[in-house]
Structure formats: C-alpha cells, structure tokens
Image: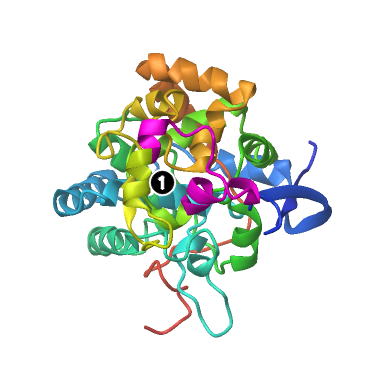
C-alpha cells in the first residue's frame, strides 16, 4: 500500500497570510496509509455496547444540558473534532494541557484564543468515569460530542465508529503546520484536504460545520481593510453585508468581538451555502469556496439541496474520524493529562 506524506505548510506574512503547502519542508509526522487503515479497522459502531452500553446516551445528555445554557457550545464542541483529527489523527492530543516538557496544541496559532468548551469534554468524561471507569477514551468522546452537537442543532444523526485510544503526547508544532488560517484560499484548502485523502466535496461539505457558531473580528479585519496587502477590501463581499461587517468590526476596533458565521448561527442547515452564493460568508476561507470553480459547484448544490449537504457532511465526518496515527495510547482518566501524571 502506498504511503501518504504530509508536507509542511509554511506561513508567510508577506503573502495573503495563507498557510501554503511546500514540498521543501516535509512534516515531522509521516502517516503511512497502511497504518491508518489498520488502525481504522479496529474502530466499529456500538463499540461500547457491552462494556458501557449507556456511553453514548450519557455523552449526549451532558452536552444537551450544556447547550441549554450556552448556545455556542454546540459549534465549539464540534470544532474540536476537526482540530484534533487533522493533527496526527483522532487521538485526543488536542485536549492535553501544556506541561514544562510539552507545548500543547491548545496554544497553537489556529487554536489559542479561538477554541473553547474544553470543560464540556471534561464534564462528559467525568460522567462516563462514574458510570464506566477507564473504559471510554477522550478521543472517542470528541467524536461522539461532535456528532451530537450537529444533531442537537437540527442537523443529521449518524452512527459513529468508536474504539480509539488517547495519545500520550501532543504536538503544537504539527498543529501550527497543519491547521489552516482563516485567510486560507480554496486552492490551499484543497491541497491540505488531499493530503488526508479527503475530496473536494468533503472539503466543501465539512466547511459547512460553519453553519453554526461565531468567529472573531480578528479573523476578518484583513479582508475588510487590507485584502492581500492591497489596502482594499475583499471585492467578493456583498456590499450590504460589508456595511454590516464594518459596523461590527471597525478598523482599529476590538478584535475579540464575534460575528455569526451564517444567518442562522444556532441551527445546523444549508443557510451557510446560501450566504456564500450571496457573497455573505464571514470568513475568507469560507467565501473563497465560491470563488473557485472546483468548490463553487458543491456550494451551489448544497445551497439548493440541504439533504445532499447533510449526506455529504456525514460522509466527510466519518472519513475525518477514521484518521488515526496507529501509535499506541491509553484510556486517560482525565482528558487533560496522561495517566502517569499525578493529579
């Protein structure tokens, strides 16, 4: 079986700020398709049916209770699967707190001041530890929680494959090299997803995760006032939407102010794609999907057919969840630290 090499994505502030693929720097992590396939074979539906039959119900109930008091929790929890799985596979490495010996992924460029709701995973883990001690991995909790966040927000429901182990370490370096910037364009995103055997349709469908949630003004001020270093705004922004964004994110304003990622930020639906067709995508990495013919085709399909979007999204999430490092791990008792650390 052929090997799959992940190439380093170099960040160049002199360009449009995108992380681009470069053959000159080979990423420290070498994922062989054979090891990925072998690891994926150990995953299966109903993995905890005998050992912890209530595992998925417990996880969903905890998340549902959190969402009742925090509308953003669903989007925040769903994002965690993306940021975990794309970095050396779905192994819960994202959840590890930084130590004196290890730089954590939470502090990576695309994660710091951006990812949230880690405490929700802690609460699910605590509930599962009471019911089934040392049986359910944190990596599996991320997969279940992402699925449930979509379903509880009005999106599709699907069976998840479980049976992952938790990693013994994290890699901030790999996270910095892999995770795309909000400035990324469709071409660089296609190149990134291709490295993980994810298709153009997978890219556009999984970008639909932005059907729910918010993002910071910090992530878009460049496209409002200095796109590509030109001193001009992104010409693809709808004029009326631009007026709204100017009010929300004025030049020199508070970069931590948040804006809705689509017009229905608490409901998982196809509105995200309808917004892109109108030029009302919040992030550059979203709106750029309508600029490139390869990705525009799927944006238009999903904007007109929500069922097609849901089906493609589920397929993409399952493929994303199959990404595994093949490295040995453990079932952490605390998602933030490995088991050999006293706490």
Where residue 14 sits: x, y (%)? 71, 57
Magenta stretch encompasses residue 266: no
In this orientation, which residue lies closer to the viewer: 206 or 285? 285
Question: Considering depth in this image, is 53 or 36 the residue closer to the camera?
Answer: 36
Residue drawn at x 14%, y 54% is 69
Q: Is residue 49 visible?
A: no
Left or right of 250 on screen, residue 168: right
The residue that disc 1 covers is 143
The part of the chain drawn in magenta is 220-242
Instruction: Where is residue 38? Give x, y as percent.
Output: 64, 42
Residue drawn at the location 53% of the way across and 65% of the way down: 105
- Percent from the top left, x then y, of residue 337? 44, 73
Q: Residues within 10 Å of mark 1 (few under 14, many from 20)?
A: many
Residue 218 is situated, as x and y percent measured from the top left of the image, at 44, 58
- Left or right of 269, for residue 44: right
Most extreme residue toward the front is 231
Q: Residue at x 35, y 60 (%)?
A: 116
Image position of 120 with respect to 209: above or below: below
Q: Is residue 236 visible?
A: yes
Whether 160 is drawn above or below 250: the answer is: above
Left or right: 142 in relation to 185: left
The furthest residue to the right:
24
> Is the N terminus in the top left, top right, bottom left or bottom right quadrant?
top right
Which residue is at a point 35% across and 62% down the rendered structure image?
118
């Amino acid at each position: 079986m052929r090997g799959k090499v992940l190439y380093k994505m170099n960040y160049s502030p002199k360009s449009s700020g995108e992380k681009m693929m470069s053959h000159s720097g080979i990423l420290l992590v070498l994922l062989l398709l054979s090891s990925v396939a072998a690891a994926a074979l150990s995953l299966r539906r109903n993995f905890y049916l005998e050992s912890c039959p209530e595992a998925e119900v417990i996880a969903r109930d905890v998340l549902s209770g959190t969402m009742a008091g925090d509308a953003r929790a669903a989007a925040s929890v769903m994002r965690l699967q993306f940021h975990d799985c794309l970095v050396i596979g779905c192994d819960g490495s994202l959840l590890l707190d930084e130590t004196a010996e290890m730089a954590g992924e939470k502090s990576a460029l695309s994660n710091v001041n951006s990812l949230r709701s880690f405490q929700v995973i802690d609460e699910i883990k605590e509930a599962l530890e009471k019911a089934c001690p040392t049986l359910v991995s944190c990596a599996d909790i991320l997969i279940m929680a992402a699925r449930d966040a979509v379903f509880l927000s009005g999106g599709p429901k699907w069976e998840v494959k479980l049976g992952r182990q938790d990693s013994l370490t994290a890699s901030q370096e790999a996270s910095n090299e892999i995770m795309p910037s909000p400035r990324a364009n469709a071409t660089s995103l296609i190149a990134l997803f291709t490295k993980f055997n994810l298709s153009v349709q997978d890219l556009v469908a999984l970008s639909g995760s932005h059907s729910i949630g918010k993002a910071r003004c910090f992530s878009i001020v460049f496209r409002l006032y200095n796109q590509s270093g030109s001193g001009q705004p992104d010409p693809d922004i709808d004029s009326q939407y631009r007026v709204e964004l100017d009010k929300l994110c004025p030049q020199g304003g508070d970069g931590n102010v948040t804006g809705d990622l689509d017009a229905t930020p608490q409901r998982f639906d196809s509105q995200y794609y309808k917004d892109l067709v109108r030029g009302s995508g919040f992030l550059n990495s979203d709106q750029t999907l309508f600029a490139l013919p390869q990705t525009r085709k799927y944006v238009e399909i999903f904007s007109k057919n929500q069922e097609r979007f849901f089906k493609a999204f589920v397929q993409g999430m399952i493929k994303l969840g199959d990404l595994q490092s093949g490295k040995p791990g453990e079932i952490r008792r605390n998602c933030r630290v490995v088991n050999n650390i006293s706490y």
